[in-house]
């Protein structure tokens, strides 16, 4: 993106309503020219492999200190039974989402892992992904935070895709009082390195921004521009999520204002127009009651929705009913379609997905790369 167009988006911070409506229309047209009238979602089970984490994000209610009686690493039996329920309800995606490397900070976490026969969460994660591939029809998507080269080498053979929210590039958030103070894995440099390594290793990758955590408008524009530049270099960013911060009771941010619908619409439309149109644009429907409006700001995907498990990161926000969502999309002239964890563009590219996993994806997909009627 040249400096002129970047300036244009930076200047959009205080754009009047007619200008916002205009870019929403442009974003909608851009989405329709690339994605047509299909709005997708992924039918998934959510496996929070551990709720312990070495970071302390101020907005997080998912994380539990190892001294808490609620601190947990899912047992093999719990993983197996969740996968089985997902398979019975025709889920395709096994989303393994977990706190970052708790064993590197807490001896208790390391001991819990040792009891399972492992030294690191990623070792256990690999075992559970292997189990998924060997014993179920589900397809692992991994969301375990920052990754180094060894992590990617270890996990790519057992997963279709991976993800890590960039969240923000603002260093201010890392300072005392900021949401990412005492969060070593939220250092922008480390997160950018993860995005780049995923690109070098050709991993279909999901990332995104967390909106309303103390970042500025310029921070959002910089983050979107950076994601797009990395994608232009490696071609691996399959999806960008624009997620609104939700204030939770019992956190230091309980009284922090949440971004409103207009702010989300503006950010979504700008994201749609800044990013390469081949990148899927997603916003979670369970975090905004009036989520149907997002369709007028250029999104083409609702992300993972589970008929089995709750959203463990936002347990107070229920997933929308899939049939209702389908009706709401239809009312606005769109067709809700089920997709796989890997977007259609990557299905025919063996360098991105290992053959044993790709064959499973192909078996479930139709000519358009979305879930076929036999598997839906
Ligand atoms: S890195 Fe994730 S799990 Fe860990 S504290 Fe932050 S939001 Fe919670």
Image (tube, rainbow, N blue to C red):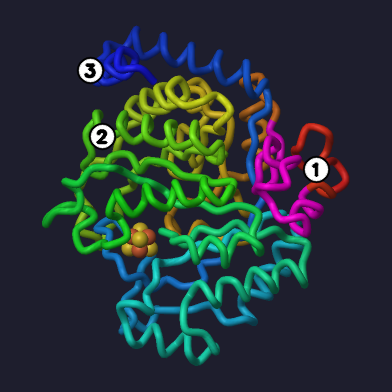
Dividing the picture into quadrants, the one containing residue 82 is: bottom right
- Using a 10 Å C-alpha cutoff, classify the residue at mark 1 as few (fewer than 14 neighbours), some (14 to 19) or many (20 or more): many
Q: Which numbered disc, 1 or 3, marks the residue closer to the eye? A: 1
Q: What percent of the width, then of the height, locates residue 200?
A: 52, 48
Q: What percent of the width, then of the height, locates residue 248?
A: 30, 55
Mark 1 or mark 3, earlier in chain: 3
Quarter of the image that includes the N terminus? top left
Mark 1 or mark 2, earlier in chain: 2
Is 331 in the magenta? no
Looking at mark 2, is its residue's CB closer than 8 Å to ligand 1?
Answer: no
For the record, the magenta segment spans 336-361
Mark 3: which secondary structure? helix
Name the side, left or right, on which 248 lies relative to 352. Answer: left
Image position of 224 with respect to 162: above or below: above
83 and 120: which is toward the camera: 120
Q: Which residue is mark 3?
A: 14
Q: Which residue is mark 2?
A: 219
Q: How many marks?
A: 3
Image position of 23 with respect to 202: above or below: above
Mark 3 or mark 2, earlier in chain: 3
Looking at mark 3, is its residue's CB closer than 8 Å to ligand 1?
Answer: no
Q: What percent of the width, then of the height, locates residue 80?
A: 68, 75
Marks 1 and 2, how far apart in space?
Answer: 38 Å
């Amino acid at each position: 993106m040249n400096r002129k167009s970047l300036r244009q988006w930076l200047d959009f911070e205080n754009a009047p309503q007619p200008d916002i409506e205009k870019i929403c229309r442009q974003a909608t047209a851009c989405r329709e020219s690339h994605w047509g009238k299909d709005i997708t979602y992924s039918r998934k089970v959510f496996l929070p492999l551990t709720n312990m984490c070495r970071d302390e994000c101020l907005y997080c209610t998912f994380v539990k200190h190892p001294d808490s009686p609620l601190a947990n690493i899912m047992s093999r039996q719990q993983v197996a039974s969740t996968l089985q329920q997902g398979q019975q309800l025709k889920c395709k995606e096994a989303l393994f989402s977990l706190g970052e490397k708790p064993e590197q900070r807490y001896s208790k976490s390391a001991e819990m892992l040792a009891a399972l026969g492992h030294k690191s969460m990623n070792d256990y994660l690999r075992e559970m992904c292997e189990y998924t591939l060997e014993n179920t029809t589900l397809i692992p998507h991994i969301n375990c935070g920052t990754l180094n080269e060894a992590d990617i080498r270890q996990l790519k053979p057992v997963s279709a895709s991976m993800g890590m929210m960039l969240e923000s590039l603002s260093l201010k958030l890392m300072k005392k009082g900021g949401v990412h103070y005492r969060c070593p894995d939220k250092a922008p440099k480390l997160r950018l390195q993860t995005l780049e390594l995923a690109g070098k290793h050709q991993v279909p990758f999901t990332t995104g921004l967390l909106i309303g955590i103390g970042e500025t408008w310029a921070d959002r524009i910089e983050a979107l521009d950076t994601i797009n530049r990395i994608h232009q270099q490696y071609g691996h960013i399959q999806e960008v999520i624009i997620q609104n911060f939700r204030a939770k009771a019992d956190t230091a941010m309980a009284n922090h204002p949440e971004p409103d619908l207009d702010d989300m619409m503006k950010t979504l439309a700008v994201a749609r127009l800044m990013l390469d149109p081949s990148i899927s644009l997603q916003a979670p429907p369970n975090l905004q009651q009036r989520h149907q409006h997002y369709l007028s700001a250029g999104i083409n995907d609702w992300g993972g929705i589970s008929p089995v498990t709750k959203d463990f990161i936002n347990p107070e926000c229920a997933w929308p009913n899939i049939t209702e969502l389908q009706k709401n999309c239809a009312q606005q002239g769109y067709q809700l379609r089920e997709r796989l964890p890997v977007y259609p563009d990557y299905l025919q590219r063996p360098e991105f997905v290992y053959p044993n996993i790709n064959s499973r994806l192909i078996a479930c997909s139709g000519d358009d790369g979305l879930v076929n009627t036999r598997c839906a």
